[in-house]
Every structure is written in C-alpha cells, then in structure tokens.
C-alpha cells in the first residue's frame, strides 16, 4: 500500500494540537501516542473527524477527493488512521483490523485530541468500517452528527447479517451517502430497514462501495465524489 499519508511528520503533543486548532492552523502532524493527523480547510460549516475503510487508508482516491472537495466548501476535515493500519504501513503488508470495540476506543481518543471548548464539536464520519466505528461511538457517547460514506449494512452476499443493532440509539443528525449498487447495502435492500428518524440518505446513482459508477453509466467517480461532498455540506449546514 502507499505510504504517502502521514510520512515523516513533526511530532507534537495532543495539547499542542489543540492549541494549533484553536488558532485555525491546518497541516499534518504526528500526534504523540496516536499517530498522523491531516487537517484541511476552514471551519465555516463544521468540522468532520474522518475515519477510513478496513483495507485502504486515507490516501485512497475516494477519501482524498472527498477531503479536498469538503475543505473547499467550508467543512474542515480531520483525517487519521487507526493504529492497525499504521502498522500495515510500517510493515508493508496487509493485516485484518482488530475487534471493533478497540477501534471505538481509539476513535474516542482521537475525538478528545481534536476537541476544544473554543471550537465547534466535531462530527464523526468516514468510510465503510470507519463509518461503522463512528456510529458505534455516537450511539455510546452521543455526537454532534454523523456522515457515513458507504456504510457496511451487511457483509457482501450476506444480507441477513445486519449491522444495525446499535442504530436505535442514534439520536444525532445522520447522513448516509451510499452508492445505489453498493454490495454492502444497496438502495433496494436498505428500503426495507427500520431506521431512526434522524437518518437521511443521499444515493449516488450507479455508484458502488467506493462510489465508482458503471463504465456505461455516464458519470465518473470524481463526479460522484463532488455530488457526495455537496450533499454533506448541505446536510451539515442544515444542522449547525
């Protein structure tokens, strides 16, 4: 996998990070005890603490494009990688993620590190597994809001194994941005789910789990990413 995310960064403490964020600084740092963090954009609409999928990190084309589009529209993105993926980069080989409860605790630590009494509370969100982790933390500790990109409602080919047990506890504004033909939960499948009233969907026509359309669909992944970013910005702006 690529090692371009978080490579050779200055190490700072979480306390120093909070001071930088309060001053409006953006950039990339290695946070002592946690790992690399990339901060993009001004916080005109809100702040979004972004996770990643199980096997691809923050340097995936989808997440790179989404962070760029969001930052350009006034959503400050704060992107990190879980410890297991940092280890994958160091070792140069793939490894499975740990138990999801461990990732929830790790996300809670990152949330503490980027939170400041003088700054808006961050929304939680991210891609696939990372979105599931974000929703679990929001169900446990509450959250300002959730942005779930390609949520893994079930493993591909196993629609009976739903990952929705904690969803009745989600009280915050929640936007799910999903490809209409996502094998982890297509539009037709999701239509039959009983979900909280706080949840809204934006469906990307022809999009798959990585928001890639069919070749004959008439659109590109970049176009779907821009469409997703516009939907996220509008949703966050509607829930200040």
Image (cartoon, rainbow, N blue to C red):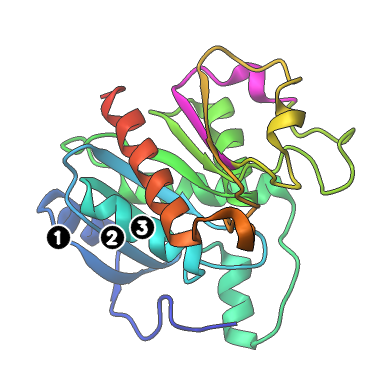
Q: Nearer the viewer, mark 2 or mark 3?
A: 3
Question: What residue occupies the far left of the structure in this picture?
Answer: 23
Q: Earlier in the sequence, mark 2 or mark 3?
A: 2
Q: Nearer the viewer, mark 3 or mark 1?
A: 3
Q: How many C-alpha atoms fall within 10 Å of the one at disc 1: few (<14), some, or many (≥20)? A: some
Q: CB under 8 Å between callouts 1 and 2?
A: yes
Task: Left or right? Give the position of 220 relative to 65.
Answer: right
Residue 96: give x, y in percent of width and height.
Answer: 75, 66
Q: Is residue 105 above or below residue 10?
A: above
Q: Residue at x 34, y 55 (%)?
A: 78
Q: Residue at x 76, y 20 (%)?
A: 192
What residue does disc 2 label? 39
What residue does disc 3 label? 67
Relative depth, front residue between 123 and 156: 156
SS class of the residue under badge 1?
loop
Q: CA distance from mark 3 to mark 1?
A: 16 Å
SS class of the residue under badge 3?
helix
Residue 159: give x, y in percent of width and height.
Answer: 86, 36
Q: Which residues are magenta?
A: 165-178
Task: Left or right? Give the position of 86 relative to 157.
Answer: left
Residue 23: give x, y in percent of width and height.
Answer: 9, 53
Q: Earlier in the sequence, mark 1 or mark 2?
A: 1
Relative depth, front residue between 149 and 77: 149
Which numbered marker is on residue 25?
Answer: 1
Q: CA distance from mark 2 to mark 3?
A: 9 Å
Which numbered marker is on residue 78?
Answer: none
Q: Is residue 168 magenta?
A: yes
Residue 236: give x, y in percent of width and height.
Answer: 32, 31
Relative depth, front residue between 95 and 160: 160
């Amino acid at each position: 996998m690529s090692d371009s995310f978080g490579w050779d960064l200055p190490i700072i403490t979480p306390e120093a990070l909070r001071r930088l964020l309060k001053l409006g600084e953006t950039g990339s740092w290695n946070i002592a005890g946690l790992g690399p963090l990339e901060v993009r954009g001004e916080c005109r609409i809100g702040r979004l603490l972004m996770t990643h999928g199980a096997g691809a990190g923050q340097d995936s084309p989808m997440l790179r494009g989404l962070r760029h589009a969001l930052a350009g529209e006034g959503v400050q993105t704060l992107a990190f990688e879980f410890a297991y993926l940092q280890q994958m980069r160091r070792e140069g080989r793939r490894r499975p993620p740990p138990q999801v409860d461990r990732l929830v605790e790790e996300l809670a630590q990152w949330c503490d590190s980027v939170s400041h009494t003088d700054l808006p509370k961050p929304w939680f969100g991210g891609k696939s597994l990372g979105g599931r982790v974000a929703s679990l933390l929001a169900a446990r500790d509450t959250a300002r809001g959730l942005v779930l990109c390609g949520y893994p409602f079930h493993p591909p080919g196993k629609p009976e194994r739903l990952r929705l047990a904690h969803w009745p506890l989600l009280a915050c504004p929640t936007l799910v941005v999903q490809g209409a033909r996502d094998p982890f939960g297509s539009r037709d499948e999701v239509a039959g789910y009983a979900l909280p009233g706080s949840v809204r969907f934006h469906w990307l026509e022809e999009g798959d789990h990585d928001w890639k359309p069919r070749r004959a669909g008439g659109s590109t992944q970049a176009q779907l990413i821009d469409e997703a970013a516009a939907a996220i910005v509008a949703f966050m702006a509607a829930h200040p």
